[in-house]
Image: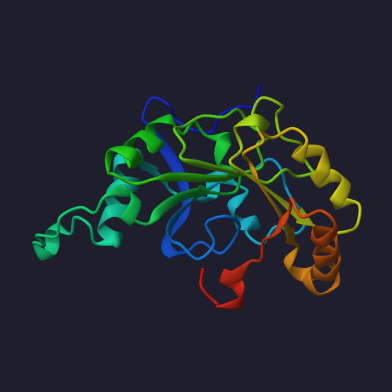
Protein backbone atom coordinates (compact mmCIF):
# COMPACT_ATOMS: atom_id res chain seq x y z
CA UNK A 1 0.00 0.00 0.00
CA UNK A 2 1.19 3.54 -0.77
CA UNK A 3 2.66 5.26 2.26
CA UNK A 4 0.61 8.31 3.21
CA UNK A 5 2.62 11.47 3.67
CA UNK A 6 0.18 13.15 6.07
CA UNK A 7 0.92 13.47 9.76
CA UNK A 8 -2.41 12.05 10.86
CA UNK A 9 -1.85 12.89 14.53
CA UNK A 10 -1.57 16.60 13.81
CA UNK A 11 -3.63 16.71 10.58
CA UNK A 12 -1.06 18.73 8.69
CA UNK A 13 -0.36 18.77 4.95
CA UNK A 14 2.57 20.09 2.90
CA UNK A 15 1.29 22.97 0.78
CA UNK A 16 3.38 24.12 -2.18
CA UNK A 17 1.03 26.97 -3.05
CA UNK A 18 -2.58 28.10 -3.00
CA UNK A 19 -4.15 30.70 -5.27
CA UNK A 20 -7.39 32.03 -6.71
CA UNK A 21 -7.74 31.88 -10.49
CA UNK A 22 -9.84 30.26 -13.22
CA UNK A 23 -9.94 26.54 -13.84
CA UNK A 24 -8.16 26.19 -17.16
CA UNK A 25 -8.88 22.58 -18.09
CA UNK A 26 -11.60 19.98 -18.51
CA UNK A 27 -15.27 20.11 -17.57
CA UNK A 28 -15.02 23.13 -15.25
CA UNK A 29 -12.87 25.20 -17.61
CA UNK A 30 -13.49 28.92 -17.14
CA UNK A 31 -14.97 28.68 -13.64
CA UNK A 32 -13.58 30.65 -10.73
CA UNK A 33 -11.48 28.25 -8.70
CA UNK A 34 -9.32 28.26 -5.59
CA UNK A 35 -6.42 25.84 -6.00
CA UNK A 36 -4.59 24.14 -3.16
CA UNK A 37 -1.45 22.45 -4.49
CA UNK A 38 -0.07 19.82 -2.14
CA UNK A 39 3.54 18.69 -2.13
CA UNK A 40 4.50 15.10 -2.83
CA UNK A 41 4.36 12.96 -5.97
CA UNK A 42 5.53 9.43 -6.75
CA UNK A 43 4.33 9.41 -10.38
CA UNK A 44 7.01 11.62 -11.94
CA UNK A 45 5.72 12.58 -15.39
CA UNK A 46 8.67 13.67 -17.52
CA UNK A 47 6.65 16.58 -18.93
CA UNK A 48 5.29 17.79 -15.58
CA UNK A 49 5.34 21.60 -15.33
CA UNK A 50 5.34 21.62 -11.50
CA UNK A 51 8.25 19.31 -10.70
CA UNK A 52 8.97 21.43 -7.63
CA UNK A 53 5.89 19.84 -6.08
CA UNK A 54 7.33 16.32 -6.12
CA UNK A 55 9.34 16.47 -2.89
CA UNK A 56 6.88 16.97 -0.03
CA UNK A 57 9.68 17.76 2.42
CA UNK A 58 10.49 20.98 0.53
CA UNK A 59 7.15 22.57 1.39
CA UNK A 60 5.82 23.96 4.68
CA UNK A 61 3.17 22.00 6.53
CA UNK A 62 -0.08 23.59 7.61
CA UNK A 63 -2.98 22.32 9.63
CA UNK A 64 -6.30 21.80 7.90
CA UNK A 65 -7.69 24.72 9.91
CA UNK A 66 -4.88 26.99 8.70
CA UNK A 67 -5.37 25.94 5.08
CA UNK A 68 -9.10 26.65 5.12
CA UNK A 69 -8.76 29.89 7.07
CA UNK A 70 -6.24 31.14 4.50
CA UNK A 71 -8.59 30.13 1.70
CA UNK A 72 -11.54 31.97 3.20
CA UNK A 73 -9.49 35.07 3.89
CA UNK A 74 -8.11 35.19 0.35
CA UNK A 75 -11.56 34.72 -1.13
CA UNK A 76 -12.93 37.54 0.99
CA UNK A 77 -15.82 35.50 2.39
CA UNK A 78 -15.01 36.03 6.07
CA UNK A 79 -12.60 38.91 6.16
CA UNK A 80 -12.47 39.74 9.85
CA UNK A 81 -9.82 42.41 9.35
CA UNK A 82 -12.24 44.53 7.32
CA UNK A 83 -15.18 43.76 9.58
CA UNK A 84 -17.16 42.74 6.52
CA UNK A 85 -20.86 41.98 6.89
CA UNK A 86 -20.86 40.02 3.64
CA UNK A 87 -22.96 36.90 4.09
CA UNK A 88 -21.51 33.60 2.82
CA UNK A 89 -22.65 32.73 -0.68
CA UNK A 90 -24.43 29.45 -1.35
CA UNK A 91 -22.06 26.71 -2.49
CA UNK A 92 -23.22 26.78 -6.12
CA UNK A 93 -22.33 30.49 -6.36
CA UNK A 94 -18.94 30.15 -4.68
CA UNK A 95 -15.70 29.33 -6.46
CA UNK A 96 -14.91 25.63 -6.65
CA UNK A 97 -11.99 24.44 -4.53
CA UNK A 98 -9.53 22.25 -6.43
CA UNK A 99 -7.03 20.03 -4.62
CA UNK A 100 -4.10 19.28 -6.89
CA UNK A 101 -0.40 18.46 -6.74
CA UNK A 102 1.90 16.73 -7.13
CA UNK A 103 -0.25 13.72 -6.46
CA UNK A 104 -2.73 14.81 -3.78
CA UNK A 105 -3.99 11.32 -2.98
CA UNK A 106 -0.61 10.49 -1.44
CA UNK A 107 -2.20 12.23 1.57
CA UNK A 108 -5.33 11.34 3.47
CA UNK A 109 -7.75 14.11 2.50
CA UNK A 110 -10.73 13.25 4.69
CA UNK A 111 -10.19 16.10 7.15
CA UNK A 112 -9.38 18.71 4.51
CA UNK A 113 -12.41 18.01 2.36
CA UNK A 114 -14.71 17.87 5.39
CA UNK A 115 -13.48 21.31 6.46
CA UNK A 116 -13.94 22.72 2.95
CA UNK A 117 -17.48 21.34 2.79
CA UNK A 118 -18.23 22.75 6.24
CA UNK A 119 -17.15 26.16 4.92
CA UNK A 120 -19.72 25.75 2.14
CA UNK A 121 -17.53 25.04 -0.87
CA UNK A 122 -17.57 22.31 -3.50
CA UNK A 123 -14.54 20.04 -3.55
CA UNK A 124 -12.75 19.01 -6.75
CA UNK A 125 -9.60 16.92 -7.10
CA UNK A 126 -7.11 16.45 -9.91
CA UNK A 127 -5.40 13.08 -9.52
CA UNK A 128 -3.63 10.31 -11.39
CA UNK A 129 -5.49 7.83 -9.19
CA UNK A 130 -2.25 6.04 -8.31
CA UNK A 131 -2.88 6.18 -4.54
CA UNK A 132 -5.93 5.14 -2.48
CA UNK A 133 -8.96 7.40 -2.68
CA UNK A 134 -9.75 9.49 0.38
CA UNK A 135 -11.82 12.60 0.95
CA UNK A 136 -15.38 13.73 0.19
CA UNK A 137 -15.56 14.89 -3.43
CA UNK A 138 -18.11 16.71 -5.54
CA UNK A 139 -15.96 16.16 -8.64
CA UNK A 140 -13.05 13.82 -9.38
CA UNK A 141 -10.87 14.53 -12.40
CA UNK A 142 -8.87 11.38 -13.13
CA UNK A 143 -5.82 11.87 -15.33
CA UNK A 144 -4.11 8.47 -15.64
CA UNK A 145 -0.40 8.36 -16.32
CA UNK A 146 1.75 5.66 -17.91
CA UNK A 147 4.49 6.37 -15.38
CA UNK A 148 2.33 4.90 -12.60
CA UNK A 149 -1.08 3.53 -13.48
CA UNK A 150 -4.22 4.35 -11.45
CA UNK A 151 -5.50 1.88 -8.91
CA UNK A 152 -8.42 -0.15 -10.32
CA UNK A 153 -10.62 0.75 -7.36
CA UNK A 154 -10.21 4.50 -8.01
CA UNK A 155 -11.13 4.53 -11.69
CA UNK A 156 -14.93 3.94 -11.34
CA UNK A 157 -15.24 7.02 -9.11
CA UNK A 158 -14.05 9.42 -11.83
CA UNK A 159 -16.44 12.23 -12.79
CA UNK A 160 -14.09 13.23 -15.58
CA UNK A 161 -11.38 11.31 -17.44
CA UNK A 162 -8.71 13.65 -18.80
CA UNK A 163 -5.93 12.01 -20.79
CA UNK A 164 -2.85 13.96 -21.80
CA UNK A 165 -1.83 13.13 -25.38
CA UNK A 166 1.92 13.11 -25.93
CA UNK A 167 2.06 10.81 -28.96
CA UNK A 168 -0.21 8.64 -31.12
CA UNK A 169 -0.01 5.64 -28.80
CA UNK A 170 -1.77 7.65 -26.09
CA UNK A 171 -5.12 7.34 -27.88
CA UNK A 172 -5.16 3.61 -27.20
CA UNK A 173 -4.13 4.36 -23.60
CA UNK A 174 -7.08 6.72 -23.34
CA UNK A 175 -9.53 4.10 -24.62
CA UNK A 176 -8.23 1.60 -22.07
CA UNK A 177 -9.48 3.82 -19.26
CA UNK A 178 -12.58 5.07 -21.06
CA UNK A 179 -13.74 1.45 -20.96
CA UNK A 180 -13.32 1.35 -17.18
CA UNK A 181 -15.00 4.57 -16.03
CA UNK A 182 -18.72 4.94 -15.39
CA UNK A 183 -21.13 5.72 -18.22
CA UNK A 184 -21.65 9.21 -16.76
CA UNK A 185 -17.96 10.11 -16.78
CA UNK A 186 -16.98 12.97 -19.10
CA UNK A 187 -14.14 12.13 -21.51
CA UNK A 188 -11.41 14.62 -22.45
CA UNK A 189 -8.26 14.51 -24.55
CA UNK A 190 -5.69 17.21 -23.81
CA UNK A 191 -2.52 17.99 -25.78
CA UNK A 192 0.72 17.98 -23.84
CA UNK A 193 1.66 21.65 -23.75
CA UNK A 194 5.10 21.46 -25.35
CA UNK A 195 3.80 19.24 -28.18
CA UNK A 196 0.47 21.01 -28.68
CA UNK A 197 1.29 22.15 -32.22
CA UNK A 198 1.97 18.58 -33.31
CA UNK A 199 -0.68 16.63 -31.41
CA UNK A 200 -3.67 19.00 -31.40
CA UNK A 201 -4.52 18.30 -35.06
CA UNK A 202 -4.35 14.55 -34.28
CA UNK A 203 -6.70 15.03 -31.32
CA UNK A 204 -9.16 17.01 -33.44
CA UNK A 205 -9.27 14.26 -36.06
CA UNK A 206 -9.64 11.60 -33.35
CA UNK A 207 -12.55 13.39 -31.69
CA UNK A 208 -14.30 13.87 -35.02
CA UNK A 209 -14.07 10.10 -35.51
CA UNK A 210 -14.89 9.35 -31.86
CA UNK A 211 -17.34 12.05 -30.70
CA UNK A 212 -17.71 10.63 -27.20
CA UNK A 213 -14.47 12.49 -26.48
CA UNK A 214 -14.09 16.26 -26.06
CA UNK A 215 -11.08 18.56 -26.35
CA UNK A 216 -9.48 20.03 -23.22
CA UNK A 217 -7.01 22.87 -23.60
CA UNK A 218 -4.85 24.46 -20.93
CA UNK A 219 -6.65 27.77 -21.33
CA UNK A 220 -4.96 29.29 -18.27
CA UNK A 221 -1.65 29.16 -20.15
CA UNK A 222 -3.14 30.99 -23.13
CA UNK A 223 -4.57 33.77 -20.98
CA UNK A 224 -1.51 33.84 -18.69
CA UNK A 225 -3.09 33.12 -15.31
CA UNK A 226 -1.88 30.56 -12.74
* Res. 77 image quadrant: bottom left
Q: Residue at x 75, y 63 (%)?
A: 191
Q: Is residue 65 left or right of residue 79?
A: right
Q: In x, y percent, where is residue 183? A: 67, 36
Q: Return the residue nearer the eye: 45 or 89.
A: 89
Q: Is residue 162 left or right of residue 108?
A: right
Compared with 54, 114 (above or below) is: above
The quadrant of the rendering that contains the N terminus is top right
Q: Return the residue nearer the eye: 23 or 2.
A: 23
Q: Return the residue nearer the eye: 43 or 221.
A: 221
Exactly how many numbered labels are in the figure? 0
Q: In x, y percent, where is residue 202? A: 86, 65
Q: Residue furthest right?
A: 169
Q: Residue at x 57, y 55 (%)?
A: 27
Question: In this orientation, does residue 166 appear?
Answer: no
Compared with 71, 182 (above or below) is: above
Q: How is the image coloured?
A: rainbow
Question: In this orientation, does residue 61 appear?
Answer: yes
Compared with 108, 67 (above or below) is: below
Q: Residue at x 75, y 59 (%)?
A: 47
Q: Is residue 105 left or right of residue 190?
A: left
Q: Residue at x 60, y 72 (%)?
A: 221
Q: Is residue 63 left or right of residue 84?
A: right
* Res. 122 image quadrant: top left
Q: In x, y percent, where is residue 207? A: 79, 59
Q: In x, y percent, where is residue 151? A: 70, 29
Q: Residue furthest bottom?
A: 223
Amino acid sequence: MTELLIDTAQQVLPVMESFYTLQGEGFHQGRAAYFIRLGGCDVGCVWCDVKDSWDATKHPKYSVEEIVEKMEKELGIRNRELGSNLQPLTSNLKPIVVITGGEPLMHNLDALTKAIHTAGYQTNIETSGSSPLSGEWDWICLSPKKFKAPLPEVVPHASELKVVIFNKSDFAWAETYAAQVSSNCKLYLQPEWDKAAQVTPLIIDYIKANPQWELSLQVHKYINVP
